Amino acid sequence: MPKKSSKISIIGAGFVGSTAAYACLIDGAASEIALIDVNREKAQGEAMDLQHGLMFKPNVKITFGNDYSLCKDAEIVVITAGAHQKPGETRIDLVNRNSAIFKEMIPKITKRLPNF
């Protein structure tokens, strides 16, 4: 049973995001966990994996998609999304690419969270 009724949205369903979602599930940290990824199928696959564990944590709702509307009503938003470093790319170049991603992403998230 979750510690309290709450929602956690995780942006990015890669290794870090899916592991964070799993940790939240087994800890009972939320009553709902939303996985959001630009690759909807990736988010769906990770959500399906989490749903297999619901027999042990039945009071948790797992949602997924590629729409930031899944952030609505979240008390916590975890951002794990970002570009992967390309061969030969400097860390500064990667930071610049990720900065551009965040500049596009953050307004879409905060639009759904009026209290932030």
Image (cartoon, rainbow, N blue to C red):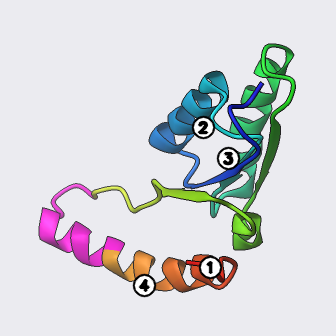
**In terms of sequence position, does the residue under pointer 4 or pointer 2 come before the other?**
2
Mark 1 secondary-structure assignment = loop
Do the CB atoms of the residues marked 1 and 2 lie less than 8 Å apart?
no
Determine which residue is flagged by label 2: 21
**In terms of sequence position, does the residue under pointer 4 or pointer 3 come before the other?**
3
**In terms of sequence position, does the residue under pointer 3 or pointer 2 come before the other?**
2
**In terms of sequence position, does the residue under pointer 4 or pointer 1 come before the other?**
4
Q: CA distance from mark 4 to mark 3?
A: 23 Å
Question: Callout 3 environment at 10 Å: few (<14), some (14 to 19), or many (20+)?
Answer: many
Q: Which mark is residue 42?
A: 3
In the rendered structure, which segment of residues is drawn in magenta? Answer: 86-98
Determine which residue is flagged by label 4: 103
Q: Amino acid at mark 3?
A: Lys
- Report the residue that reaches farthest toward the front: 4
List x then y, in percent, for residue 36: 66, 57
List x then y, in percent, for residue 52: 81, 21
Disc 4 or disc 3, which is closer to the eye? 4
Determine which residue is flagged by label 1: 115
Disc 4 or disc 2, which is closer to the eye? 2
Question: Callout 2 environment at 10 Å: few (<14), some (14 to 19), or many (20+)?
Answer: many
Dominant secondary structure (helix, strand or loop) of the stretch shown in magenta: helix
